Image (spheres, rainbow, N blue to C red):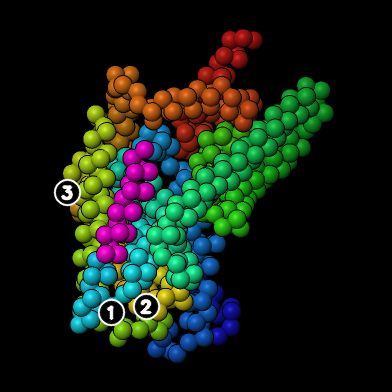
Amino acid sequence: MELSTEILIMLSLLMLSIMGGHYLKKKHHKYLQESGLTVLIGAIAGLVLKSMSYEAYMTNLSNHFVRLFMLLLLPPIIFESGFNMQKKYFFRNIGSIILYAFLGTFIAIISSSAMFYAVGLFPEISPSFTVQESLAFGALISSTDPVAVLSIFKQMDVDMTLYIMIFGESIFNDAISIVMYTTVHESTKRNETFQSELAISVRAFLIILMGSVAIGMTSALITAYILKRQANNFQREQQVALEIEKITKTQQQYKRKQNVNTEISMMILCPWVSYLIAEGFELSGIVAIMVNGIFLSYYAQPNISNSARSVLKTGYETVAQTAETLVFIFLGVALFAFNHPYEQMGPWLVPITIINLGISRFLNVGIVSFLVNKSRTTNKITKRFQLVMWLGGLRGAMAYALAMKSSFDFEKGPVMLIVTLLYAFISILLIGSLLYPILTKLDVTNKSVGEAVSVRSNENQLSDENEQQIPLNCCNKLKKILKKYENKYFSPVFISDAISERNVNDMVSVGGDTHRFDQAKLGLINKDSNN
């Protein structure tokens, strides 16, 4: 099969999935979600391709999926989520998010690994796993998928705090799963004990996390500063040219268009550069590009024109949605099109895995929620939120990408791969289909845009009032210090003085950070009063 034919097949499936998803949205289908439909389309396509004996195409797709996913599909999804997310909610819950991601994922890995090892002692119900294989299996299948979760939650206008908690957990959770899996694999290759590698892995993880954050933040701040200088220079040139009347309206429009093109190019290239730099240094590109999206939105977005902002917002969302759709198509195709050792896993391993992961997720959410609620006086994680978080731990392409790697790294790797793929398929179809009615029944979705804005506004006011009454702990002190330095040093350095009132208002209308733009307005008012 020629390359053009292979591309045509994937584009046809992509168009069919997008049209099907649009139809589901139009009909407000409660049970079959867009992600579930896309996986089904991919599965049917996989069956057809296998029946037509396209082995070469399937082998090509299988061999390149992990690289394609990590380099092309995942970055725009994570970046768009970081760029457009409600940063106020994210940083307000950052301590809880880190606790769920670090402690929760560790609980999930250890508990699921122990159960995989235990059931392996009974060969009549499960293949036997070594300690290293059990830990690797637990690590890779504990990776919750932000792609699967976000694509479902975005359609439902889920409560913002709940959305942010699950989103934040899934982002950091992936990095922990990758480091844990790598640690187990390295200990197997060196014939060393897992315990001796664990201390090394903790240090490696901290380096990966801090290095990734530094790369994402630094590249975003450099871009913001360049765009600030460009905005100031462009504004100055326009004013001078108009004053001496040496520029026509056509020339002015041409220069503005050139300026917009530069802004768009910078805002597109920056996240990819940060992701690839992090991957090149063997750090976490996922964390780097998410941090990059947050800082670009916070510091660089105020420096660009209205036209560039509108194009970027629509463009980011379109590319992310297309990448999400392709990921689910690949998952569906992989289920039937590739040659998997179904006979090696036995009839009971998949049901055991479902029960195992249900228990480990229950322990994860339950224990961490208890600790979070003990440290909070307000905004506790309710039982309803905990139930949704338990159901929201879907598995998808990230777990599958690690499982693909395990098929080459471990003797039981092919079994891990097919079990992970089947569990991801079941969780997206079954749990994903049940999420809408469950969320509606539990009343954790916002009823309407107007009511959502009103409720969130009231919550923000109450939260601000409560903050003054609650004694400051270390986390709150750190937040206040960072906020003080941000207002005093970062904003003046990285945000342009050339923001017009029209620019500010339009930023808010296209979904920017209202707190950031309120500060910009305040700066303009102060300037006017001084003049």
In this rendering, is residue 154 above or below 43? above
Query: Can residue 445 be seen from the camera position used here?
Result: no
Q: Is 512 left, or right, of 102 in this rendering?
A: right
Mark 1 element type: loop
Residue assigned mark 3: 441
Distance of mark 2 from mark 1, alpha carbons?
8 Å
Residue under label 2:
412
Residue 519 seen in render? yes
Label 2 close to label 1 by CB (< 8 Å) = yes
The one nearer the camera, 91 or 175, is: 175
Q: Earlier in the sequence, mark 2 or mark 1?
A: 1
Residue 193 percent location from the top left of the image: 41, 65
Residue sitting nearer the eye, 37 or 195 = 195
Number of other residues with Cα within 10 Å of mark 3, as a class: few under 14, some 14 to 19, many 20 or more:
few
Distance in Å between CA atoms under marks 2 and 3: 41 Å
Q: Is residue 289 left or right of residue 88?
A: right
Label disc, if present, on residue 127 of the rendered structure: 1
Predominant secondary structure in magenta? helix
Query: The magenta stretch spans which residues?
Result: 95-114
Among the two numbered marks 2 and 3 on one chain, the one whose residue lies closer to the N terminus: 2
**Label 2 environment density (alpha carbons within 10 Å; few <14, some 14–19, many ≥20):** many
Where is residue 164 drawn, in percent x and y? 36, 43
Residue at x 61% of width, y 38% of height: 221
Using the image, tell me which numbered label, if any, was put on residue 256: none
If you read the primary sequence from the N terminus, does the residue marked by circle 1 or circle 3 appear first? Answer: 1
Q: Nearer the viewer, mark 1 or mark 3?
A: 1
